[in-house]
């Protein structure tokens, strides 16, 4: 299966349904009051973790998702039908970011976990909602609120207990193939593994752990050299790191230097990642040239305060001891507490600061930016005189004329608010 671990998608929640403007008309009620109903809510865009999906491959071909619009209100104060949510299935371990701001919207790590990433618009109010002691027969109703839309960046971070790191061709693929049912490509050239490979390692009845073969890291990985950022991202969630080196130095590199260089890259990428528990694994001890490097590697592990295992993935030498030790180590590890900012967040514009911003465009026209005001503009029927007067009242309440005068507006100049354009008059 092709492994896709990053995708960009566009989502648009549904618009709210329009409110209804109508009056009660019955045989024996000659002067019935307003009875227009409210519109229904637009559908939300919801991401949901699905156990049957393990890559972001589907988003390579389908990048646009739209929820349905709410139904319009009707006579006799009947509400419009609310639209169904658009539920997008994603794999476990998906990190969701706003593509424009980089803000983390959700970190989906549990099966069945859900996050609303774009809210559907509320339905417009019917004219029955605007009846008051001073306004007995309102003729206007609101349009539905537009649904939110945004670009999302989805990143998949593998959820594995153990991550294998090390230079290319040190035997990581051979190791995971020897201890699990995973079958990565194995050959005698660099970067055989180009995508992460997961394998389930059994420790007996009802006990196992997940091991990830991360593609070979090289010096400069923290700067993105050799797809470094793509590979390092997958190590972040592992509980334990198996640092594999080639004890036989088949490629002529020094395994002690390899160990130090990879750890430098881990620290440069993330201080937290550099403190993750490690086990130093010296592979290829079945080769005669490995013997001269083993004492120095064992001494290095002692200096670093980490466990050391000398193994051969090819002959399975010492593999059982290593796997059993990993199982016990995982049992003893205390889970790290996730920072608050990694929790699922439902994007809520109502809780954000909403200042009034006045700008000038290249044509010297005035542009008023305010989320709440733009929402009111989108929901107002300006063809209805009462709706227009209501908007003018809101305009005055926000002191927008004073703001515009302070910016130098003159009689007859053009003002833009959302999709509305008009000439300003004193």
Image (cartoon, rainbow, N blue to C red):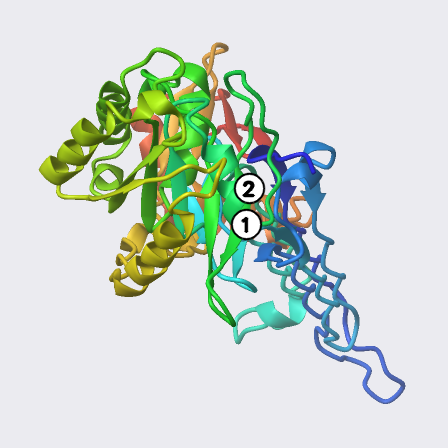
Report the residue at 39% width, 19% height from top. Answer: 224
Report the residue at 46% width, 23% height from top. Answer: 169
Q: Tags 1 and 2 in contact by the CB under 8 Å rule?
A: yes
Q: Quadrant of the N terminus?
A: top right
Residue lying at the far left in this picture: please name it. 303
Above or below residue 173? Residue 279 is: below
Q: Nearer the viewer, residue 86 or 286?
A: 286
Q: Residues within 10 Å of mark 1 (few under 14, many from 20)?
A: some
Q: Is residue 325 left or right of residue 368?
A: left
Residue 26 shows in the view: yes
Residue of label 1: 180
Residue lying at the far front in this picture: please name it. 288
Residue 59 rendering spot, x and y as whole percentages = 67, 38
For residue 61, the mark is none
Which SS class for mark 1?
A: loop
Residue 292 rendering spot, x and y as whole percentages = 24, 23
Residue of label 2: 177
Residue 157 shows in the view: no
């Amino acid at each position: 299966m092709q492994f896709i671990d990053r995708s960009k998608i566009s989502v648009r929640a549904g618009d709210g349904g329009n409110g209804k403007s109508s009056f009660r008309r019955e045989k024996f009620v000659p002067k019935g009051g307003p009875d227009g109903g409210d519109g229904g809510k637009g559908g939300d865009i919801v991401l949901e973790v699905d156990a049957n999906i393990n890559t972001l491959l589907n988003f390579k071909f389908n990048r646009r998702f739209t929820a349905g619009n709410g139904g319009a209100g009707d006579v006799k104060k009947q509400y419009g039908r609310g639209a169904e949510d658009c539920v997008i299935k994603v794999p476990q371990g998906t990190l969701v970011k706003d593509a424009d701001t980089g803000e983390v919207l959700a970190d989906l790590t549990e099966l069945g976990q859900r996050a609303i990433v774009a809210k559907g618009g509320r339905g417009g109010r019917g004219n029955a909602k605007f009846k008051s002691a001073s306004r007995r027969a309102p003729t206007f109703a609101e349009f539905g609120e537009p649904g939110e839309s945004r670009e999302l960046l989805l990143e998949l971070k593998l959820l594995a207990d153990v991550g294998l790191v090390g230079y290319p061709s040190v035997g990581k693929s051979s190791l995971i193939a020897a201890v699990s049912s995973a079958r990565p490509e194995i050959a005698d050239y660099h970067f055989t593994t180009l995508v992460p490979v997961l394998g389930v390692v059994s420790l007996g009845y009802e006990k196992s752990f997940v091991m990830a073969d991360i593609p070979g890291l090289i010096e400069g990985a923290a700067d993105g050299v050799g797809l470094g950022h793509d590979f390092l991202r997958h190590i972040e969630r592992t509980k334990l790191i198996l640092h594999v080196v080639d004890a036989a130095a088949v490629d002529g590199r020094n395994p002690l230097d390899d160990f130090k260089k990879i750890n430098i890259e881990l620290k440069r990428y993330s201080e937290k990642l550099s403190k993750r528990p490690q086990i130093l694994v010296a592979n290829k001890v079945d080769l005669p040239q490995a013997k001269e490097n083993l004492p120095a590697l064992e001494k290095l592990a002692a200096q670093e305060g980490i466990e050391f295992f000398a193994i051969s993935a090819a002959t399975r030498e010492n593999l059982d001891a290593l796997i059993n030790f990993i199982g016990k180590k995982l049992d003893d590890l205390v889970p790290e507490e996730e920072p608050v900012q990694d929790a699922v967040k439902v994007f809520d514009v109502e809780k954000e600061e909403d200042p009034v911003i006045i700008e000038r465009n290249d044509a010297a026209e005035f542009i008023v930016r305010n989320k709440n005001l733009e929402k009111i503009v989108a929901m107002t029927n300006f063809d209805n005189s009462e709706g227009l007067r209501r908007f003018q009242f809101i305009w005055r309440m926000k002191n927008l004329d004073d703001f515009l005068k302070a910016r130098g507006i003159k009689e007859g100049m053009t003002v833009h608010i959302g999709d509305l354009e008009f000439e300003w008059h004193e």
